[in-house]
Amino acid sequence: MTELTTPAQLNGQDGHLALKRPAISFEFFPPKTEEMERSLWETINRLAPLEPKFVSVTYGAGGSTRERTHATIARILKETALQPAAHLTCVGASRGEIDEIVDRYHEVGVRHIVALRGDPPGGIGTPYFTHKDGYQSTAELVAGIKKRHADIEISVSAYPEKHPEARDFDADIDTLKAKVDAGATRAITQVFFDNDLYFRYLDRVRASGIAIPIVPGIMPMHHFRQARNFVTRAGTTVPDWFAQRFEGLDDDAETRKLVAASVAAGQVHKLAKHGVDTFHFYTMNRADLVFAICHLLGIRGKHVQKAA
Ligand code: FAD
């Protein structure tokens, strides 16, 4: 959130969003198969005309998608006018290896990295061990990237419900502060469904003197049941009222899709009403719901794309 816009500026008298166009970004994961690659590119081509500020590509747990993340980023740079942001974690790699990845990205023209610690190699909930020659924390990684390439913009994570490993909110916010002090200029939040949690978190963050944008991460829940398990393990609360919206729809993909779009659009609309003007969408490599939500936010495509 770069600057707070008042609800009056954002909303017309009828309560609908007025013209101020929110800034958006999209997150993708690197495809595993040719079919997934085709589907990702359909998604990218559908969403690109919405002119996101950037599109980010995740880095599989433990660096498992290193080459696929790089290939996806390289193709985005080559075939589109989009600004890619490459996710990168500290897990299971020495500083030298990470530095090499960063240099390679810089060489092909990447100027934005989403820097993360990463989950423990044993999975969420198991102890995290740093690599003995590796970056020991995300803040160290951020500083390491900045030292090599001052022109790389760095985004980091933020946790409105605190990271599950954090002792308490103060410790979590201290970590965010260290990342900002090291050079991060934007934080993207873990997915959340209760907007109050985001606003309370924002209050804590601002009270600690952190001024960078804390961009809400929005996830339309296409496959509610699977997605609930996944987000819950990462520390996100799924409120009962939210789960009730999807009750009885496990075998009804069409209705689930409409409900998922409507619920996420409602969340985004309420955030916008309270002055939030930037959103990061976890697309899960699907365009339909995110496109619809952006449309409801007043975002229209420009229908211009760089030729392949
Ligand atoms: P940090 O922000 O560095 O730390 C998070 C919290 O954990 C802090 O409170 C910190 O104090 C505490 N902490 C850190 N280390 C320890 C420790 N050793 N002991 C106790 N507490 C500790 N994961 C991927 O693998 N690939 C991705 O592409 C990816 N993208 C993400 C994008 C976003 C926007 C978000 C929110 C998360 C993403 N993740 C990704 C998940 C992330 O790697 C995990 O949540 C990971 O567990 C923490 O990494 P971090 O950079 O958020 O940690």
Image: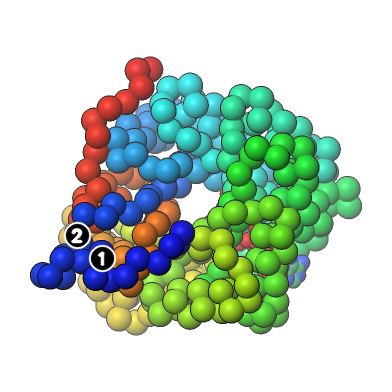
Q: Out of 145 and 75, give the one closest to the viewer.
A: 145
Q: Position of residue 11 (x, y in %)?
A: 21, 66
Residue at left offset 70%, top offset 40%: 150
Residue at left offset 40%, top offset 67%: 4
Q: Out of 130 and 81, give the one closest to the viewer.
A: 81
**Relative to 267, is 152 on the left or the right?**
right
**Relative to 144, is 291 on the left or the right?**
left
Q: Residues within 10 Å of mark 2 (few under 14, many from 20)?
A: some
Q: Residues within 10 Å of mark 1 (few under 14, many from 20)?
A: few
What's the colour scheme?
rainbow
Residue at the spot of label 1: 9
State the image quarter where residue 43 is shown: top left
In the rendered image, the vertical position of residue 50 relative to residue 275, given as above or below: above
What kind of element bears circle 1? helix
Callout 1 touching callout 2 (CB < 8 Å): yes
State the image quarter where residue 266 is shown: bottom left
Foreground: disc 1 or disc 2: 1
Residue at the spot of label 2: 18
